[in-house]
Image (spheres, rainbow, N blue to C red):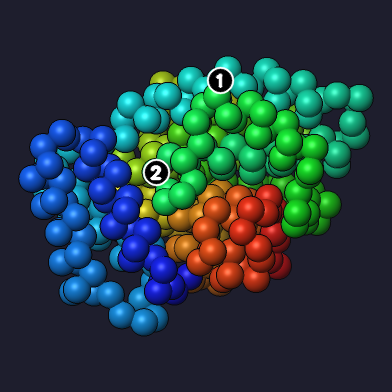
Amino acid sequence: MKINPACPHCLLARVHYEAQLSTDDEELQHKAVIGGIDVLNEIYKRGVTSGSVATLIHRKAYEILNDNDPYFKVKQQSNRAAKRLLPFAHSLIHEGNPDTGELFKRAVLASVIGNYFDFGILEFNVTVDMFDRTFTELFERGLDVDDTPRMLEMLDNVVYVADNCGEIVLDTLVFDVIRNMGYKVTLVVRGSPILTDVTMEDVRTLGIDKKVDHVLTTGSNAVGVCFEEAPDELLEAFDSASLIISKGMANYETLSERKFRPIAYMLRTKCQSVASDMGLEVGYSVAKLLE
């Protein structure tokens, strides 16, 4: 996805947010924001990819803050909330003994609603207390874009590119359905901390590495997937996948620049830039397949 004129405003707001998470030193917060502005002055132009700009801005902020994981506590909070919600989500998915197609669709829906766990996006801060009610409302509404019937025929060897902590707990509902069908899941996580994204340490701490067949990393702390920094084993996994599932907006922003097929984008459209690029409205629950 190419950068939208609205993106710099949002990126700088997020830098300010993570600076506040990292330090009470207002001078250091100013320096982090100034660092983001410097990056924008250097590389921002029409046609540049949004993910590459975001990566450089957040790396500069982390460097200035001398903090390689300012979202650490937020990630733990997200995981705790999602684990508390998991039994309820599981009961909704299995209610009425659905057939395999319906079960897969419900699991995907729960996972997409989990994408709501994204703290720090401008104008989209969701408290944990609000989430239970919101989850139920969104589950009853269903998927606004539902390509799960076509996805169901492509699950032999899935490469699943994960997004945030918190929602990764609900992603396990999808993993369980796929593996119970006798198929394989390779989970892809970030190579090191960036924003609230899942890392190898996070999945091991949560025991999610036991829920899939393999876990690979993107090779770095880039926002989404930086293919120049990706290990060969990840590129080979993409090439051999029967279906790539891209979770969340950051992964969409980077993977949409490539011509991988088939690929399914599972996310909530939480900002106008991504929604417009997908030809959708803000606030949609999406499972969109490209073949």
Task: Quote the CA–CA distance across marks 1 and 2.
Answer: 20 Å
Q: Amino acid at mark 2?
A: Gly
Residue 282 versus residue 166: which sits nearer the camera? Answer: 282
Front in this rendered view, residue 269 or 256: 269
Residue located 27% across and 50% down the image: 15
- Above or below: residue 70 compared with residue 2: above
Residue 257, image x, y percentages = 48, 71
Label 2 crowd bin: few (<14), some (14–19), many (20+), radius 10 Å: many
- Check the image and name the residue furthest to the bottom: 46
The label on residue 120 is 2
Which disc, if any, is residue 83? 1
Tell me if I can see residue 126 in this picture.
Answer: yes
Residue 119: image quadrant is top left
* Badge 1 or badge 2: first in the primary sequence: 1
Q: Amino acid at mark 1?
A: Lys
Tell me which residue sits at (40%, 74%) in the image: 5
Callout 1: helix, strand or loop?
A: helix
